[in-house]
Amino acid sequence: MEGVTWGLLFTLAGLPALEANDLFDKDSSFYYDWEGLQLGGMICAGLLCIAGVLFALSGKCKCKHNQK
């Protein structure tokens, strides 16, 4: 009886995942362009990394123990 219960549970839990692939509508407001979002995030992260390295190497970032 426990095996039947687990089987029914997994079947009911898996049905929405099987039907979710058919629901992609590119005109929907809930559709996300994941590749574009990932590319934008990588560009933003790269620019912030370059800005951080330039700031650290510019000499304007001084620690308290170096101000003697």
Image: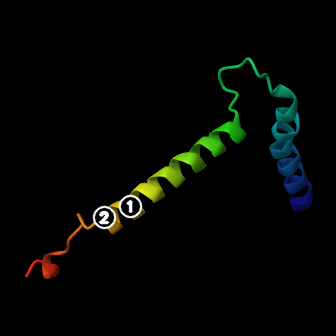
Relative image position of residue 13 (x, y in whole percent): 81, 45
The residue indicated by pointer 1 is 54
Dividing the picture into quarters, in which one does residue 24 lie?
A: top right
Dividing the picture into quarters, in which one does residue 61 lie?
A: bottom left
The image shows residue 16, relative to residue 60, as above or below, that is above
The kind of residue on which mark 1 rests is Leu
For label 2, the crowd category at 10 Å Cα-Cα, with few meaning under 14, some 14 to 19 and many 20 or more, is few
The kind of residue on which mark 2 rests is Ser
Q: Which residue is painted at 71% across and 19% down in the image? A: 28
The residue indicated by pointer 2 is 58
For label 1, the crowd category at 10 Å Cα-Cα, with few meaning under 14, some 14 to 19 and many 20 or more, is few
Choose between 8 and 32: the one closer to the eye: 32
- Residue lying at the far top of the rendered structure: 27
The image shows residue 27, relative to residue 8, as above or below, that is above
- Marks 1 and 2 close (CB-CB < 8 Å): yes
Q: Tell me how the rendering is colored.
A: rainbow
Residue 59 relative to residue 5: left or right = left
Relative image position of residue 22 (x, y in whole percent): 87, 29
Q: Which residue is painted at 34% across and 68% down in the image? A: 57
Relative image position of residue 41 (x, y in whole percent): 57, 46
- The secondary structure type at the circle numbered 2 is loop
Residue 61 relative to residue 12: left or right = left
